[in-house]
Image: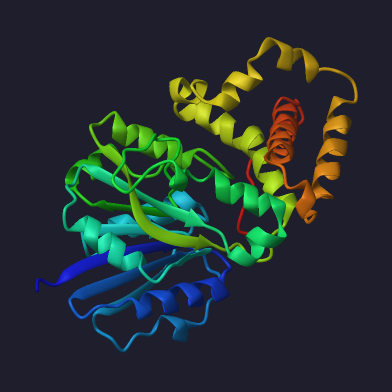
Amino acid sequence: MKLLGISIIIPTYKREKKIISILKSLKKQKKKNLNLQILICDSFSHYRKELFKSKNKNFEIKYSNIKENNLSAKRNYGIKNSKYKNIILIDDDCIPDRNFIKNFIKDFSSLNDKTILSGIVDYPIKYIKKYNHISFKNKKHFKSKYTNGDQIPSNKIVAMNLGFIKSQKMSKIGYFNKKFTGYGFEDHEFGHRYKINGYKLMKTNARIIHDEGKPNINIFSKKYYHLARDGMKNFVKINEKLAKSTIFYKLETNFLFILVVKLPLFNCLLLFIEKLIISTDKMKFLNFSIFYEILRFSSYTRGYISRNRNNLKVNKFNWYE
C-alpha cells in the first residue's frame, strides 16, 4: 500500500496539557502506511522540550516559535513549512476522536486540490449535560444539517478542524488573513475567498472534541462582545462587501437598533440581562436556546457600543490568556 503523508498544524499558546492530550490521541491513530508530521506553532510558551521527542520516524513532531502571537500567522507558518501536501488544521483545545485520521485519510484519497474540508465539532458530554451554554453551542454547529460530502456555506466552516491539499494556487490566493485580531470572522473570510476562486467547501466526518477546559459562560459572552468591538471592525476593513452580508452587520445598521443603543443606561440594562441569563447556566429546567440568543445579542450590542466610543484605543484581545 502506498505510503501517505499528512501534516497536522496546531497553533498554540500556554496550553501544554491540551497539547499532550492531542499528541496522545494522534499517536494512537498512527498507521503503518502513514507518515504523520505534527507542526506545533507556539509563541514562546516555554513548553517542556521532552514533549516533542518522538522515537517513531513516521511520527515527526516539529515545534516552532512564532514572534506574532496571532492565530492566522501561526496557521500560515505551519502550512508554508509543512512537509506533506495533505494538510489538517486543528486548534490546541481540540482533541481528535479515535477515527479522526481515518476519516481524513478516506477523504484525502478521493480529494482534488480545489476542495476544502471542514469537520465536525463536538463538546465534552459532561459539559453538555451540566452547562446550558455548552449545550447551546453544541447544537449550533453545522454537523446535524449536512451529511458527509455536502457543500457548506463559507460562514459555517471552522479553522479548528479543516483539511485540504496544499497547492501553488492556494499559495497565490493566500492563506489566513493576519489582519484579523482578537476574535471572529477569519474562517468566514478564508472560506469565501476560496469559494469565489472556484473551490468547494465540503463537510467531512472527521471529528474533534472542543475542550476549552472548565466552561465559563462569561468567556462565551465576552467572545460576542469582542466579535462586535474588534472582529466586525477588522472584517469591514478587510472585505467590506462580505462583512455587509452578515446578520451582525445587518443588525447594527438597522434603524431601530441605532436608535435604541443611544438610549441612556441602555448598556446597563444589557449588563443586567446578561447577568440574569448567566446565573441560570446550570439550571437544566431553564435550558432554552432563546436565552443564549439573547445573551449573544446583548454581548454583541455592548461590543458595538464600545467600538463607537471615541476614547477606545485598544482593539486587541488575546483569547489564549
Q: Residue at x 58, y 30 (%)?
A: 233
**Camera-nearest residue between 241 and 273:** 273
Residue 281 in view of the camera: no
Q: Is residue 188 visible?
A: yes
For the N terminus, the quadrant is: bottom left
Of residue 296 and residue 316, the one placed in the foreground of this image is 296
The residue positioned farthest toward the front in the image shown: 285
Query: Outermost residue, bottom direction?
Result: 55
Residue 125 coordinates in the image, percent (x, y): 59, 64
**Number of callouts in the render?**
0
Q: Is residue 122 left or right of residue 153?
A: right
Q: Residue at x 23, y 52 (%)?
A: 166
Please report the residue visible at 24 percent of the width from the left and 63 percent of the height from the top.
Answer: 105
Measured as percent of width and height from the top left, residue 109 is found at 17, 58
Q: Is residue 175 above or below residue 97?
A: above
Q: Quadrant of the C terminus?
A: bottom right
Place of residue 219 in the rendered image (x, y in percent of width and height, measured from the top left)? 70, 51
